[in-house]
Image (tube, grey):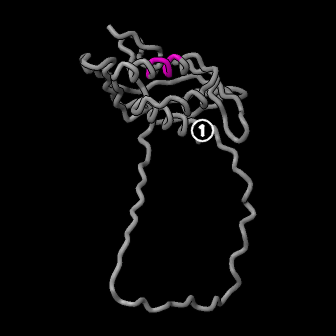
Amino acid sequence: MLRLPPLFHRQGARRVSASLVAVAMGLTLLVGCSGEQPEPKFAEEPTAEPPSPTVDAAPKKETVKEFLVRWAEVEREMQNTGKTEEYAALSAGCQPCEALVKRVEEIYANDGFIRTDGRLIQGVDEKGRNRYSVKVAAAPTEYQSTAGAPVESLEGGESRYRIHLKRHQDSFVLAQLVEEGQ
């Protein structure tokens, strides 16, 4: 039987939770040639002064909700790819997060996999200085702990976590995460 750290299960039959569906972006480059000589085109004379640079050039501080959404996206990406570095940096010092990193690394080192659409941050309630109660909905998850092992599935569902964030430059680091239940 596969023993998973707290982020992988719920009371009784706790379930894996991961984050939001990340937005995929693509870039298409079209190249064309013809035997005809191109006709030069000139830009029209500007009729007004060019726009002045924006005053809002300073980096924007990330809000708690923005950080949590990004953290959930990075967690989903980590679980689906096995690349743990960015998630580990966002949650340095968080013991359950470090256990999850270790488990993901073990699964991928043993040619296993995790497939999940992750967690959706549904609500954030402040509970004190840098302490929050966060409601999440976790997507169903499939995983294979080693190559050739049976594929197991977890149903997902809603959970609530108590978290402690530490301010780091213009963002945060997740320092503590405790599941409160539903």
Q: Which quarter of the image is occupied by the C terminus?
A: top left
What crowding class fits label 1: few (fewer than 14 Cα within 10 Å), some (14-19), or many (20 or more)? some
Q: Is residue 45 above or below residue 147?
A: below
Of 37 and 26, the residue lying toward us? 37
Q: Horizontal placement of 25 versus 61: left or right?
A: left
Q: Residue at x 55, y 19 (%)?
A: 98
The quarter of the displayed image where residue 108 is located: top left
Of 103 and 16, the residue lying toward us? 103
Q: Is residue 122 in view from this perspective?
A: no
The quarter of the displayed image where residue 141 is located: top left
Q: Is residue 13 above or below residue 18?
A: above
Task: Verify whether residue 80 appears in magenta.
Answer: no
Q: Which residues are magenta?
A: 99-104
| Relative image position of residue 24 (x, y in whole percent) | 41, 49
Which residue type does callout 1 highlight? Phe
| Relative image position of residue 101 (x, y in whole percent) | 50, 22
Q: Which residue is mark 1?
A: 67
Q: Residue at x 70, y 29 (%)?
A: 166
Q: Main secondary structure of the magenta part?
A: helix
Q: Residue at x 74, y 54 (%)?
A: 58
